[in-house]
Image: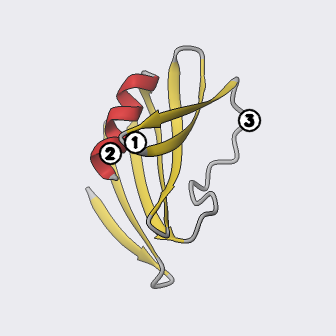
Amino acid sequence: MRFRVADDTMIEVLIQGGDQELCIRKAPGDSDISGDFTVYEWTQTVDADGITLELRGNGDYARVAIWTRDGYTFSITTNADLTPEAMTAMAESVA
């Protein structure tokens, strides 16, 4: 697990295991800070625990979650096989 502060405005936690990677970011504002510019097969909006998540993914798996809360923007990106439900639960635990 690695922690990083970028430009004194964004924090990032990077978790790696084998060939799987998960990145969680938080920064002030409301823009997309995921750094993921992939064109995904689907985008879905989910209301969870008082936040509105934008999920993006391919097939049955979510690869990106983005949301804002209390003046901050958050993102989770992964190459692991997470269902939309698992990604939503992860976002709820971060928020």
**Residue pointed to by mark 1:** 21
Amino acid tagged 3: Val
Give SS at disc 3: loop
**Residue pointed to by mark 3:** 39
Residue 92, by quadrant, is top left
Q: Residues within 10 Å of mark 3 (few under 14, many from 20)?
A: few
Give SS at disc 1: strand
Please tell me the numbered disc located at residue 30: none
Q: Is residue 94 above or below residue 69?
A: above
Q: Position of residue 94 (x, y in %)?
A: 31, 51
Please tell me the numbered disc located at residue 16: 2
Give SS at disc 2: strand
Amino acid tagged 2: Gln
Q: CA distance from mark 3 to mark 2?
A: 23 Å
Q: Nearer the viewer, mark 3 or mark 2?
A: 3
Disc 2 to disc 1: CB gap under 8 Å: yes
Disc 3 to disc 2: CB gap under 8 Å: no
Q: What's the residue at 25%, 55% (across, down)? A: 1
Q: Position of residue 20 (x, y in %)?
A: 38, 35
Q: Position of residue 31 (x, y in %)?
A: 64, 62
Q: Report the side of 52 relative to 83 (left or right).
A: right
- Of residues 29 and 3, the one drawn nearer to the viewer in this rendering: 29
- Of residues 11 and 19, the one drawn nearer to the viewer in this rendering: 11
Amino acid tagged 1: Glu
> Nearer the N terminus, badge 1 or badge 3?
1
